[in-house]
Image (cartoon, rainbow, N blue to C red):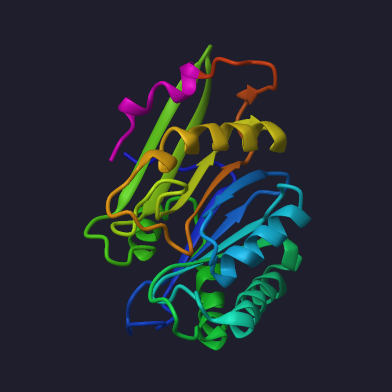
């Protein structure tokens, strides 16, 4: 069973970036006031969306409202034109949703070195917005795949002293996996209340014990990124100064595929 995360919605659309009639665009909406932390690849040749997402995340101080993900084209090795495409895509999301460009984080995965069409993304975005709902995890997880043979989803609902919080996440990645942000795109959401500074600390601690220890073929991608968003819609509050979060993070074995 995949649990919805209150305050987080996902929309899926077909942009035709690589194949026609194929889900290849995902838009994630985060409730006002949500906190989002991001860890990016340490590759010296970071893709255009990684550069723009890092700039926007720093500018909004951990309060992103939209995550935009496309497959079929990594927008990597594309220079300044690639950065313009990433920026135009964020501008399109902001215009459609009455948000601001720095509240939009772009992510791309797929073929490296080929130009990405901003027009394809912009034409598909209205459909992604119309499709936004809180139970779209399965379809979104399938839409972000590239060479993967199966979707990667985890979800858990945890009771803490009579209060319940949900953690649900999806990821993609099959090759080019090496320590220092193993090649993946990962998007995790929880309805717990977590301030940005603590959220960032928790994500970096988790990445150090997971993504940064994985190795398959010795290659680190240009597009690696993982996000952790806390919407604050549940009554569960995680506060700085508490060092033992095992009641939450120690239960991953009970998560559902």
Q: In this rendered view, identify the residue nearer to me: 143 or 228.
A: 228
- In front: 87, or 35? 87
Q: Can residue 195 be seen from the camera position used here?
A: no
94 or 195, which is in the foreground? 195
Residue 112 in percent (x, y) is at 42, 76
Looking at the image, residue 47 lies above or below residue 62: below
Residue 55 coordinates in the image, percent (x, y): 71, 61
Residue 254 x/y as whole percent: 32, 26
Q: Is residue 60 left or right of residue 231?
A: right
Specify the quadrant of the image occupied by residue 210: top left
Q: Is residue 201 above or below residue 102?
A: above
Position of residue 215 measured from the top left corner of the image (x, y, whole percent): 32, 46
- Residue 227 among magenta residues: no
Residue at 69% x, 55% y is: 57
Look at the image and tell me in which quarter the N terminus lies: top left
Q: Position of 227 compared to 113: left or right? A: right
Q: Which residues are magenta?
A: 246-257
Kindly identify the residue that appears in the image at 60 percent across and 24 percent down.
236
Q: Residue at x 59, y 56 (%)?
A: 29
Residue at 27%, 66% in the rendered image: 147
Q: Quadrant of the C terminus?
A: top left
Q: Is residue 217 above or below residue 208?
A: below
């Amino acid at each position: 069973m995949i649990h919805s995360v209150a305050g987080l919605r996902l929309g899926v659309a077909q942009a035709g970036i690589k194949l026609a009639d194929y889900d290849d665009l995902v838009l994630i909406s985060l409730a006002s006031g949500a906190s989002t932390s991001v860890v990016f690849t340490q590759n010296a040749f970071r893709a255009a969306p990684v550069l723009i997402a890092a700039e926007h995340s720093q500018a909004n101080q951990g309060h992103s409202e939209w995550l935009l993900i496309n497959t079929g084209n990594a927008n990597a090795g594309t220079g300044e034109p690639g950065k313009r495409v990433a920026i135009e895509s964020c501008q399109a999301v902001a215009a459609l949703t009455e948000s601001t460009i720095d509240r939009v984080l772009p992510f791309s995965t797929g073929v490296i070195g080929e130009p990405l069409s901003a027009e394809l993304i912009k034409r598909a975005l209205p459909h992604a917005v119309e499709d936004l709902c809180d139970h779209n995890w399965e379809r979104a997880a399938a839409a972000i795949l590239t060479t993967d043979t199966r979707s990667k989803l985890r979800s858990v609902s945890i009771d803490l002293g009579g209060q319940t919080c949900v953690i649900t996440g999806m990821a993609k990645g099959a090759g080019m996996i090496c320590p220092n942000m193993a090649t993946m795109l990962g998007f995790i959401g929880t309805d717990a209340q977590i301030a940005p500074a603590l959220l960032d600390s928790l994500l970096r601690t988790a990445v150090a014990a997971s993504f940064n220890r994985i190795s398959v073929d010795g290659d680190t991608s240009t597009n690696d990124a993982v996000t952790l968003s806390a919407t604050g819609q549940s009554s569960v509050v995680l506060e700085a100064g508490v060092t033992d979060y095992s009641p939450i993070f120690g239960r991953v074995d009970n998560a559902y595929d």
